[in-house]
Amino acid sequence: MNLLVTALAEVGDSVRGVVEPALAGGAFEALGDDDLLAVMGALAAIARRVEGALIEAVGVVEARSQGARSDRLSARAGCRSVSELVQRVTRVSPHAASGMIRAGRVVHRDRALASGEWLEPTLPALRDALVAGEVGVEAVNAIAGPLTDAAARAARDDVLAADAFLADAARGLRDRDVDVDVDVDADADAGVRGPAPSVADLRAMAHLWASAIDADGAEPVEAGALRGRGLALGVPRRGLVPLSGMLLPEVAAQLQTIFDALMSPRVTGPEHPGSNAGGPTFREDAAPGSSGDGVPVDGRTRLQKQHDAFATALGAAARAGELATIGGAAPTLVVYVREDDLVSGSGWAQVEGSDQPVSMGVAAQIACCGTIQRVGFDGAGRIVSLGVRDRVFTAVQRKAIALRDGGCVIPGCGVRAAWCEVHHDQEHSRGGPTHCDNGLLLCWFHHRTLGTSGWSVRMRHGVPEVRGPAWWDPHRRWRPVRGSPLRRVRRAQGA
């Protein structure tokens, strides 16, 4: 057997002799905080060494899988591609195999056919960092991706300069905040190590270097991105419509900003003027009903929260009045429902633009903050009556209600007024007026789930009140909403 294979088998036995007893005996649970982190660091260092060897091996496998099919290593092993061969040998996912193959391409060294000398890899400094155990697969690809994209247009010397800087940064020898045009770094020359950056930091630094050495590459990249952009709505399945596509970076950044604004944790206390001072907050570490400290718990996953934030943004955009009109009117979501079904709360409704029926709860939410147009038909289907009853709160009313409520009235929610919908306390269909004394602010999520979440709201003498579910307030008491900034200031001043 080859000496390298034998040596690696012995290393594997040594690692197994340490790891198996530690896992079986609960050694990790017995560690103190500092020792636990030290063990994690040591394991990660071993993993980087192993990944470096794997990348080199995969690079050789790919090199031997070129040329005529009968000469390819992958074909001789009975595999259709290098990826399949790597997956079968290493038992990793296609994504992980692809990552190792990409990394191997930039650090693998070929031999010159004539002299047999080693040729320089695409990124030699990054290879040295790999050999030293300073980077693994993810770090190599985080650096190599932007640099190899720029290499087609940038000068080779500039690519090597970026490679050297980023390899030193991965070792903790470069300040991640140093400008890309600085050639000498005192810490790197002195071998002084600082904190090594994360993979995300390395990727950001690599993009910065790529933009500096390939200033002319922005236009072709932009042109390609514009061609590749797209957004598609799929076929409804089980009440859900798939959404897929590719966003331009600035569009994704804008959407992420909206997510951050609507999903930021609620901070309480008088030192935070925008908070629900002294009130409860949502907490992620407990399920509804399990908290005994009176803290409302938001049980939504992050993906569910992002969906609700997206829905909130769409509603706010439609209400803003700045979008293009359709048939002379603002883009309006139209829901068709029989009046008897809306009153009874049973049956299904239909949304214009979708073949998927929706529940009566959807119709009720939209009817609560929209305009109802009643159309009467006779038995043959002829329109015999047509009427419109305005039930939408005006801009002036919304501003007044926003000043009074401050945002979503559910304690701890934190969605600010501009993103909220105005809920009719007494339904318009039951005679409730479109008046400030009958309207209160709810975010899209709490408005949609008001009938099922356990939260209740009401207006009492023109002041909104909230009653929480039993797990939050066993006494189920009505509590006045204290979200108004003016009321908070008055309380703080003792007025």
Image (cartoon, rainbow, N blue to C red):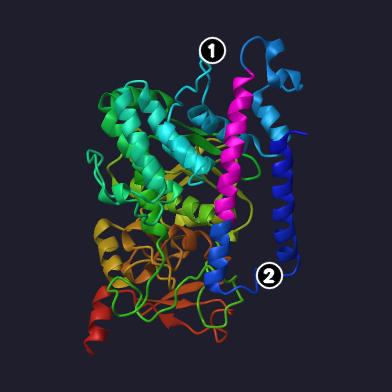
Instruction: Decide: is 355 above or below 276.
Output: above
Which residue in the structure is indicated by mark 1?
113
Main secondary structure found in the magenta portion: helix
Q: Amino acid at mark 2?
A: Ala
Q: In the figure, is residue 59 to the left or right of 258?
A: right
Residue that appears at 26% across and 66% down = 400
Tell me the quadrant of the picture where the N terminus can be found.
top right
Element assignment for label 2: loop
Q: Image quarter for residue 94?
A: top right
Is residue 63 covered in magenta? yes
Q: Residues within 10 Å of mark 2 (few under 14, many from 20)?
A: few
> Looking at numbered disc 1 in the image, what kind of residue is underneath it?
Leu
Q: Examine the rendering and report whether any part of residue 324 can be seen.
A: no
Is 490 located above or below residue 114 in the figure?
Answer: below
Q: Position of residue 445 (x, y in %)?
A: 48, 59
Please tell me whether mark 1 sits on a helix, a strand or a loop: loop
For the record, the magenta segment spans 43-65
Q: Which mark is residue 385?
A: none
Task: Report, in whole angstroms, how far the alpha carbon at label 1 lies from the one at label 2.
Answer: 53 Å
